[in-house]
Amino acid sequence: MRNIARTALIVFLASCGPAYGQTPATNPYPKMAPVSQYLMPRAAEIAMARSAGPASISTHAEVLALTKSGYVVAAKGTNGWTCLVGRMWTAGFGDAEFWNPHGRGPACLNPPAVKSVLPQYLARTKWALAGDTREEIAQKCQAAYASHQFTDPAPASFAFMLSKQGYLNDDVKGPWRPHVMPFVALDQVDTWGASFKGSPILSPATATFRRYEPVTIVIPVRFWSDGSPAPK
């Protein structure tokens, strides 16, 4: 389960910094595909984004949709939340599926995450669509942390990832399981009890992170956003 959880973490936002590991020798996605392969019909993207959270929240959230130049507001919100469908270029820089055009990660971010985490994701998206290589994106992320343009996640930052839609990666070939995903600083992982033996709260190996990178932990939950039960 931990390997699957680790992949679930990176589908939305993993890190701006050094890679999780070295790029495999055999990489099915060595470079970015044509931009059109990452895009979705607008109505379908809005619906998928909203499916990430409870309807009581996502119905009133701002929704972003991807275009050839970046995300745009597809539906205005009133509650401070933002829902969107993430793409795989937010994976670790050593991930073989970094440029996988099939990846779709629906997420609804709460107001603290909208302020402190979402700008990092939007920047990575802009750089990717502008034609930057993964190495160039990594360098820009590191510079942004050094200049304090990017910061640790704000306290209480988290995202709902409760959608039965989406595409985690080529191994899962669909969604993983419903979960809540807090964004925390590296030194807060143990405070959450993440990945201790017997703990239901999961995290990637913290040794792969640097102090200036946001860490996402996963708390599996029992129901999808439509109310149906999660897989056992």
Image (cartoon, grey):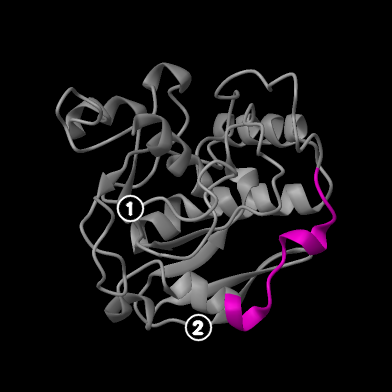
Crowding around mark 2 (Cα neighbors within 10 Å: few <14, some 14 to 19, many 20+) is few
Q: Amino acid at mark 1?
A: Phe
Q: Which residue is mark 1?
A: 158
Q: Is residue 111 magenta-colored?
A: no
**Closest to the observer: 145 or 186?**
186
Hey, which quadrant is residue 222 in on the image? bottom left
**Closest to the observer: 44 or 232?**
232
Q: Which residue is mark 2?
A: 76
Q: Which residues are magenta?
A: 32-44
Residue at 58 percent of width and 19 percent of height: 21
Q: CA distance from mark 1 to mark 2?
A: 20 Å
Secondary element type, mark 1: strand
Q: Is residue 35 left or right of residue 6?
A: right
Q: Is residue 30 above or below residue 205?
A: below
Hey, which quadrant is residue 23 in on the image? top right
Q: Amino acid at mark 2?
A: Lys
**Closest to the observer: 38 or 4?**
4
Q: Position of residue 163 (x, y in %)?
A: 40, 65
Residue at 56 percent of width and 48 percent of height: 120
